[in-house]
Amino acid sequence: MAVQPRFWDPRGERFGIPTYPWNLAPLGLATRRQLREQGLRPGGQDVVAQVLWHSNRYRRPGTPGIRVAYLFAIDRAKPVRPMTPGRRAALAEAMRARRTCPDCRQDAGYVIPTSLGSCTACSAVHEQRAA
């Protein structure tokens, strides 16, 4: 008798919703990222199924390291809303704010890391003062 994969539950009896192991989800279902690649979005529909897999890469102490990806029906997905001029301007302003150093008020040309809190030039000055 063949052994079923650990996360094989197409009826949802064990996990509450249909569950499939990595690479064994049926056709017609896709993750949010896969929908976006096709120019689609879930459009308010509920999760239809999930894919579970074991990952040592994302395992933290005390956790089982099981990852999940939720699946949506492709035939019920809606097209992605077009980018409006207002939305485009708002996104540009948000990105400009992420690139602007709060200390020197200059556009760093890159997104300032939250770990530093300022551009590399200003954070180097702060480190020299602290030493």
Image (cartoon, rainbow, N blue to C red):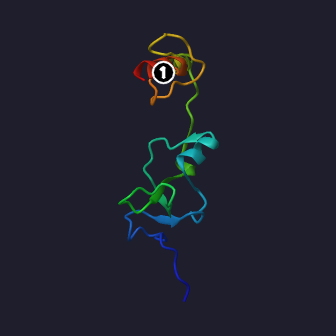
Q: Residue furthest right?
A: 38
Front-most of residues 32 and 67: 67
Which quarter of the figure is the N terminus placed in?
A: bottom right
* Depicted 111 relative to depicted 43: above or below: above
Which image quadrant: the C terminus? top left
Q: Which residue corresponds to the image point at 50% horizontal and 60% vertical from the top-left?
A: 56
Residue 127 pos. (x, y %) = 45, 23
The correct choice, above or below, for 5 with respect to 24 in the image is below
Q: Which residue of the protein is positioned furthest toward the bottom in this rendering?
A: 1
Where 101 sits versus 57, above or below?
A: above
Q: Quadrant of residue 27?
A: bottom right
Front residue of this view, candidates 107 and 92: 107
Q: Residue at x 56, y 14 (%)?
A: 107
Q: Amino acid at mark 1?
A: Ser
Category of crowding for the residue at label 1, using alpha-carbon neighbours closer than 10 angstroms: few (below 14), some (14–19), many (at least 20): some
The answer to whether residue 94 shows anywhere in this view is no
Q: Which residue is mark 1?
A: 123
Locate residue 6, reporting x and y percent.
Answer: 48, 73
Q: Residue furthest front?
A: 131
Q: Quadrant of residue 28?
A: bottom right
Helix, strand or loop at label 1? It is: helix
Q: Position of residue 80 (x, y in %)?
A: 57, 35
In the rendered image, the vertical position of residue 48 relative to residue 41, given as above or below: below
